Amino acid sequence: MTTLRGFSVALVTCLVACGPARAGVSGGVQLPPFERFTLPNGAEVALMEKHDTPLIAMTAVVRGGALADPAGKEGTASLFAELIQKGAGKRDGAQFAEAIESAGGELGAGASTESLRVSASFLAKDADLMLELVSDALTRPRLEASEFEKVRDRAIQSIAAAKDSDPSALIGEYGDAWLFRGHAYGRPVDGDEASLQAVGLDDVKRYFSQQVSGDRLILTLVGDFNPAEMKSKLEAGFGRWGKGTTGVAAARPAPRIAGRRVLLVDKPGATQTYFWLGNVGAARTDPARTAQGLVNTVFGGRYTSMLNTELRMKSGLTYGISSNLDRLSQPGAFRITSFTQTEKTTEAIDLALATLDRLHADGLDAPALASAKAYMLGQFPPAIETNGQLAGRLADMLFYGLGPEDVNEYAARVGKVDAAAVRAAIDGTFPRSADLAIVLIGDATLIRDRVKKYGTMAEMKITDPWFAPQ
């Protein structure tokens, strides 16, 4: 990573020579040129000038995110992200929304495990309004009591509604809480019913004053603007924003689990069982990430994957099953998720485990690897096509300390993956079926005895106001 933090006393620029957007020799793509610099307060900025449409997309990222939530008050960062859209600066909630809509723009905010993010897209002629709104949201949010109560109540009701109807939206919360017990990655980003109830407006205000500051800010803009003019506007809007009063929250690496542990979440009357199988996987910057991605593509990352072929196409046990790697600064979860009819619970899970065993036993043959390479190379360019996608990608690169080679050398990295790299990725990243955290949400009276075979089991109720046994 080329860092400019040491030069934060001045507005220092650095032109990143990436070449024009085009297909590479190996069929890849390259980022258009962009310019990196730091504001006087240490905020990192990347500007990509692009005049093909009269639009500007902006991403603002603040390091820390839900990792900085107070213990027992998980969801604080998420509530803050919702509230900054409900009034900031001179505008109350209605006026803030009207300013966005009257310009035909878009602005949204959210929290993730390690950051807060604001994304905006406006016509180039409304750039000043966009910068004002984003700056107000981050530096001058109103955080009004009446809006806070509505946002918190809605968050609690949303969790309760998902538990009552379709818990598939929450299976990941249960899975992470069960896998990462005692670790920061096991805390729910959006909180649970108990933690949200414990959060008060003062907690949100304290989070803002301590955790949301200019020294941990990343700004990326892509679109139709004059770079010199934009620099001056960003310095005026964000460069004088001060520093946080505490350090940026960070997570330590979590150990992979050995053996199995099973959590059964009782949902009486459920006609389906939702299941989550996982272990600690790989980080965003893992040197083997390309090989890992190719393996996951074949195993559970596309419609014709091994998992979907076995559990949907051949057996009809589910409407769909997938595997994913949650990539964070430290390794997040590798997870397999799906659902099946209650009476088919063990049949579906047994087949998923057998398919994981087959991945370890057989690896990927040459045709499967070639197919995965073609698939990933075809899927990559559309993911960095629009101004908003490019702004998001630049923010991701700056957040994780990656340079333009993360995009520009993507095709070359894919092409270099060979059988040895595939085998190393399988052995080093993908868990054995004997080493898994397993979560099942279903009717315990119907499946309890049958799922005991998977390992030491704990139980809780779907109505419990948290995502792991207390």
Image: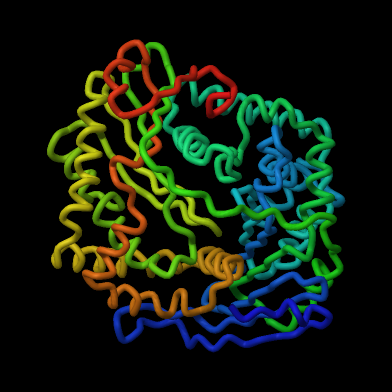
In the image, is 443 to the left or to the right of 137? left
Q: Quarter holding the N terminus?
A: bottom right
Report the residue at 66% width, 50% height from top: 65
Q: Position of residue 146 (x, y in %)?
A: 81, 30
Residue shown at 83% from the left, 32% from the top: 145
Q: State how many labels appear.
A: 0
Seen in the picture, residue 276 relative to 428 is either above or below; the reply is above
Q: Quadrant of the C terminus?
A: top right
Q: Is residue 468 left or right of residue 191?
A: left
Above-or-below relation of 376 to 210: below
Q: Position of residue 304 (x, y in %)?
A: 20, 51
Residue 35 visible within the image: yes
* Residue 104 seen: no
Does residue 378 lie above or below 346 as drawn? Answer: below
Give the left or right position of residue 142, taking residue 258 as reference: right
Pinpoint residue 425: horizontal percent, then vertical percent.
32, 62
Q: Residue at x 53, y 24 (%)?
A: 469
Which residue is rendered at x = 47% and y = 79% of the image? 405
Query: Residue 103 location in percent, x, y?
Result: 68, 57
Q: Nearer the viewer, residue 415 or 355?
A: 355
In front of the other: 382 or 425: 425
Structure colour scheme:
rainbow
Q: Is residue 17 left or right of residue 384?
A: right
- Along the line of sight, the residue nearer the viewer: 3 or 71: 71
Depth order, front residue of 322/91: 322
Instruction: Name which quarter of the figure residue 279 lies in.
Output: top left
